[in-house]
Amino acid sequence: MSRSVRKTKIFGITTSESEKQDKRRWNRTFRKVFRKLVLSEKVANHKIHSVTEVRSGQKDGKRYNHNATIRDMRK
């Protein structure tokens, strides 16, 4: 991957590489709440954002960097 470069100047705000553990925790919480709502025969929300707070993850979104160098654009 010596020629692999980013096409846009968008980077994660923190230095964390992945949100895998956060996504696992959010999905477990969502499944638990959804299962309880289905068993109680209430109308269940089918959106994960209604149950979890996505902003509490390791990476808090992405941002466009106008001044990105060639080194920053490498993967």
Image: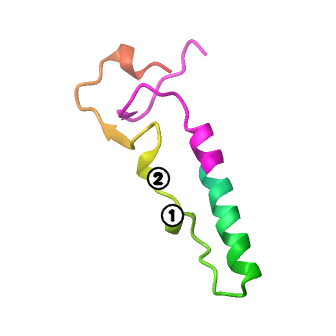
Q: Is residue 27 above or below residue 2?
A: below
Q: Which residue is mark 2?
A: 54
Residue farthest left in this picture: 67
Residue lying at 65% horizontally and 46% vertically, measured from the top left: 24
Image quarter of the N terminus: top right
Q: Which residue is mark 1?
A: 49
Residue lying at 45% horizontally and 18% vertically, measured from the top left: 74
Q: 67 or 34: which is nearer to us? A: 34
Among the 4 quarters of the image, the one containing residue 42 = bottom right
Q: Position of residue 11 (x, y in %)?
A: 38, 33
| Mark 1 crowdedness (10 Å alpha carbons): few <14, some 14-19, many ≥20 | few
Among the 4 quarters of the image, the one containing residue 20 = top right
The magenta segment = 1-25
**56 displayed left or right of 9:** right
Residue lying at 37% horizontally and 41% vertically, measured from the top left: 62
Main structural element of the magenta stretch: helix, strand or loop? loop
Task: Say the numbered circle drawn on residue 31.
Answer: none
